[in-house]
Amino acid sequence: MCGPITPAIAVAIGTAVVSTGLGIGQSVMAYQQQEQAAAFSNAQAQQSYQFQLQQSNSARMFENLKKDQQEEMMRINRLMADNAYANDVAALNARLTQEFAAASQEQQKGAIAGAKARGEVVASGRLGNTVDNLVADFYRQQAQFDYSTSQNLAFAGTQTQLQKQGAAAQRASRIGSQQPYIMQPVLDPLEPIRQSGPGAGGAILGSLGAVVSGVGTGFSTYKNAPESWKKG
């Protein structure tokens, strides 16, 4: 049978139990605090990641919007440039046509006037070199008038072609004034690495250490107890 429990033994056991309980409690509390800290850190990192991801998506949508707006601007600008070029060419063609028509009318008037003058000379009944010279002079004047008219029309045609080239260059300049929008690259944020919580092994080791420390405290208490307490 075991001997009686002396006051020293009772105090030592109580001290060991209390010390062990406090040690285990502290170990459990430390484990819970570490676990809560890891969970809080992970929650903060995830919240920051979601916010950055929303920012990236918004920036990407804004870049796409600017690209679409620029494409629409280019389409409208090209349409306006094409319409302006078509109007310029149509106006140049109309003016050249009017000049050809006016020149043709003047040539017809000149031909009629020359024929009438020649007819009058011939109808006068005069003969000889003088009449021939007058008729030849009328033909010469008509030919000179026709040549001048042809030269003027050729000059007008050349000038019209140059003006058309200028209109084409202006059209190209208008179209080139609007360039495609180059989208800026938008990178998604890196997903955070989840911080792992404390392992259960640490809590177990801490509890075992508390038990060992409590037992040691109990032995130390018994050893340092008065001799009178150690007697039954």
Image: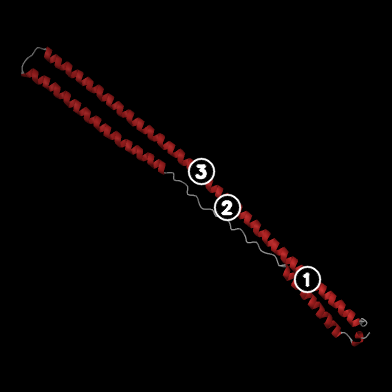
Label 3 neighbourhood size at 10 Å, few (<14), some (14-19), many (20+)? some
- How crowded is the residue under tag 1: few (<14 C-alpha within 10 Å), some, or many (20+)? some
Mark 3 and mark 1: Cα distance apart in space: 63 Å
Q: Secondary structure at mark 1?
A: helix
Q: Residue furthest left?
A: 128
The residue drawn where x is 20% and y is 26% is 146
Residue 52's tag is none
Query: Relative to residue 35, is residue 216 drawn left or right?
Result: right
Residue occupying the point 50% across, 45% down: 67
Q: Which mark is residue 68?
A: 3
Rendering quarter of residue 198: bottom right
- Mark 2 vs mark 1: give the one in front: 1
Q: Secondary structure at mark 2?
A: helix
Where does residue 116 sit, x and y in percent of width and height? Answer: 17, 16
Q: Mark 3 belongs to which amino acid?
A: Asp
Q: Quadrant of the C terminus?
A: bottom right
Picture coordinates of residue 87, whole percent (x, y)? 38, 32
Please state if 22 lies on the left or on the right of 42 as rendered: right
Colouring scheme, one of rainbow, by chain, secondary structure, one colour: secondary structure
Q: Disc 2 or 1, which lies upstream in sequence?
A: 1
Q: Which circle's residue, 3 or 2, is located before the other in the chain?
A: 2
Q: Which residue is mark 2?
A: 56
Quarter of the picture containing the N terminus is bottom right
Left-right relation of 196 to 87: right
Amino acid type at circle 2 is Ser
- Residue placed at 89% from the left, 82% from the top? 8
The reply to whether dot 2 and dot 1 touch (C-beta < 8 Å) is no
Q: Vertical placement of 73 versus 115: above or below?
A: below
The residue labelled by disc 1 is: 26
